[in-house]
Amino acid sequence: MPNHAPDDVLAHIERECMVLARHQVMVNRNVEGRPLERSAYLLISRLEAEGPMSIGQLADAFMLDTSTVNRQVAALLRGGLAERIVDPDGGLARKLRATEEGRRRLAADRERHRRGLERVLADWDEPERRELLDVLTRFNRSIEDLQGNAWPRPDLATGAGSRD
């Protein structure tokens, strides 16, 4: 790669992030079945990672206004993708958890994404795939550190959940 000024490199990184986001959307347009809306995919993923959460906890986790999350949750409830439950820890606020249908749809979407990634990365060897994983994880964790809001991740070696 030629030697670029830092502003040029940042401009190229910004463009590549935009293109990456575009490709993710395009994958979902060309699939059979009904892919989850982006907000549903993210909310159900968070509920799966953390367990039942209140609207306030989800709003904090996504750094969104509670009214925005409330609208997104209402769509999940209408679609049978989530349900309200009594707080398992005995708190007053009702919590949300993904329904069996929500978990099934999330798993189907994740499998579609994995198949798409497998096609894209078919000629990448394992060290290259791990390098991509390492760079993406570092990039996302840098964002999370600046926001003070980590996304829970399973440990690659054990599959156990982690927030660090």
Image (spheres, rainbow, N blue to C red):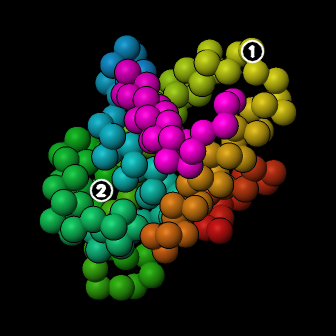
Other residues around mark 2 within 10 Å, as few (<14) / some (14–19) / many (≥20): many
Check if residue 8 falls in the magenta segment.
Answer: yes
| Marks 1/2: CA–CA distance | 42 Å
Q: Could you say where residue 135 lies in the image, as x and y percent from the top left?
A: 68, 46
**SS class, disc 2:** strand
- Give the quarter of the image for residue 127: top right
Q: Residue furthest bottom?
A: 91
Which residue occupies the foreground of this view, 75 or 116? Answer: 116
Are discs 1 and 2 less than 8 Å apart at CB?
no
* Residue shown at the point (29%, 56%) measured from the top left: 83
Type of amino acid at the residue the image marks with label 2: Glu
**SS class, disc 1:** loop
Q: Earlier in the sequence, mark 1 or mark 2?
A: 2
Q: Left or right? Give the position of 74 relative to 144.
A: left
State the residue position of label 2. Answer: 83
Type of amino acid at the residue the image marks with label 1: Asp
- Give the quarter of the image for residue 131: top right
* Residue shown at the point (50%, 70%) measured from the top left: 146
Q: Quadrant of the C terminus?
A: bottom right
Q: Left or right? Give the position of 106 relative to 73.
A: right
* Residue shown at the point (55%, 20%) measured from the top left: 116
Position of residue 151 relative to residue 115, above or below, is: below
Q: Which residues are magenta?
A: 1-26
State the residue position of label 1. Answer: 123
